[in-house]
Image (spheres, rainbow, N blue to C red):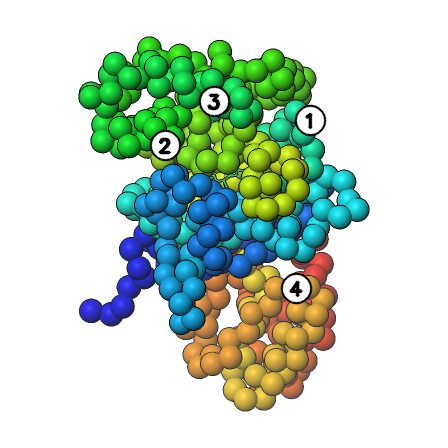
Amino acid sequence: MSIQSPKGTFDILPYGADEPWKLSHLWQYLEKIICSTASDYGYSEIRTPIYERTELFCRGVGDSSDIVMKEMFTFLDRGERSISLRPEGTASVMRAFLEHKLAEGRGVQKFFYLGPMFRYERPQSGRYRQFHQFGIEAIGCAHPAQDAETIDLLWEICRRLGLKGLKLHLNSVGDAGSRQAYREALQNFLRPHFESLSQDSKTRFEKNPLRILDSKDPGDKKILEGAPSILSSLSPDAKEHFDEVRRLLDQVAIPYEINDRIVRGLDYYTKTVFEITADVLGAQNALGGGGRFDGLIGSLGGPDLPAVGFAGGIERLIQTMLAQNAPFPEQPRPLLYLLPLGEEARRACFSLAAAGRRKGVFVEIDLHAKKVGAGLQAASKLQARFCAIIGSEEIAKGLSQLKELSTRQQIEVPLDRLIDFCLEQKK
Ligand code: HAM
């Protein structure tokens, strides 16, 4: 059998994809909208390596997170250094920010990124081992307005993509003091049920009890029904911060639901956390999520700078758009398909095609045209608007027979007017 792509990965193709969300022109469209929206909000693009030293993710994402413990692609390079494929973008952006001293002499720094991430998860619909995220990080502003701007940006990207019926889940995991208080309250609540908890939750009980709230185990879920809310452990400062985020979202009419069970799978969050979900996605319904992470830069050895950001999954966005029949631009199609018959005609068409392309006309030329029938079929398959069949007779007369493929109408156009004629039709 021929070699296939590794489990949990997929190809993005111009045509012939087994599922429509794997068509490259849809990806190009999304990437364009994401970049232009991020740019409208003052974010600049940052590109970091696809792999980093493993230590970065252990310190950045958290040693006790599922991502680091179970999901990283980690290997030793030929120099015996431990390397990991990036499972997310935030830790890398913070590393680059510190390495290049981007903080110096500047105020708030705002970055966006886009690209493949890698997690060794059990593949299923909406969950892959190589998947694509776009994300943003704003560094240097502790004000709740920065949290609200971040959420507004994700919401706006979804709006520009034509998505509907999305839910924004909002929570606060508080500052360090609030979290310590909640950790104890949660442990006190869970202690009498300890023996009935799932094995994963038992392990998390001491290390990372907040993550128990994320458990998918039905038994754990039942026990958690009566658990105290993290919101009741917020310090006055964390509470005021959360209230202001809510006021600002209300002010710009972004609807949200308070969901005190959202704690997120990465260890770096403080205060605001959020997720946007879409019903049509089934089990893997998070389109994107993020929050504030005021301690991360400090824990990576940098200054004590606040930060907030999010990441969204591009596969899930495209899948949601298709499921909701959101509008996509059509695949570009040639305005003019040149069908040369013979060597002399090929040369003439080569110049015509170059002239057209220089004027911004999408011209396709059939470089190995042999028969008119096959050439016309190829032009129709590409959905070209016009097709010009050019042989030695046309060249001698300086005229071409231009066929409009959808109507089958034929008109005579002088060869030296062909490109301008097409340009006029484009308008
Ligand atoms: P995350 O929630 O782990 O956050 O991932 C963000 C989004 O990436 C998810 O909501 C989902 O759409 C997509 N995603 C995650 N894993 C997969 C997968 N295996 N297959 C397909 N899509 C997936 C982060 O990564 C944080 N770095 C976000 C952040 C940025 N927080 C602050 N700044």
> Mark 3 touching mark 2, by CB under 8 A?
no
Instruction: Tell whether 398 sits left or right of 269.
Output: right
- Which residue appears at 36% of the width and 35% of the height? 284
Circle 1 SS class: loop
Distance CA(mark 1)–CA(mark 4): 49 Å
Q: Which residue is mark 4?
A: 361
What amino acid is found at the position of numbered circle 1 in the picture? His
What amino acid is found at the position of numbered circle 2 in the picture? Lys
Mark toward the start of the polypeptide (3 vs 2): 3
Distance CA(mark 3)–CA(mark 4): 63 Å
Q: Name the mark nearer the viewer: 1 or 4.
A: 1
Distance CA(mark 2)–CA(mark 4): 62 Å
Q: Which residue is mark 2?
A: 207
Instruction: Tell whether 75 sits left or right of 348.
Output: left
Q: Which residue is mark 1?
A: 143
Mark toward the start of the polypeptide (3 vs 4): 3
- Which residue appears at 47% of the width and 42% of the height? 61
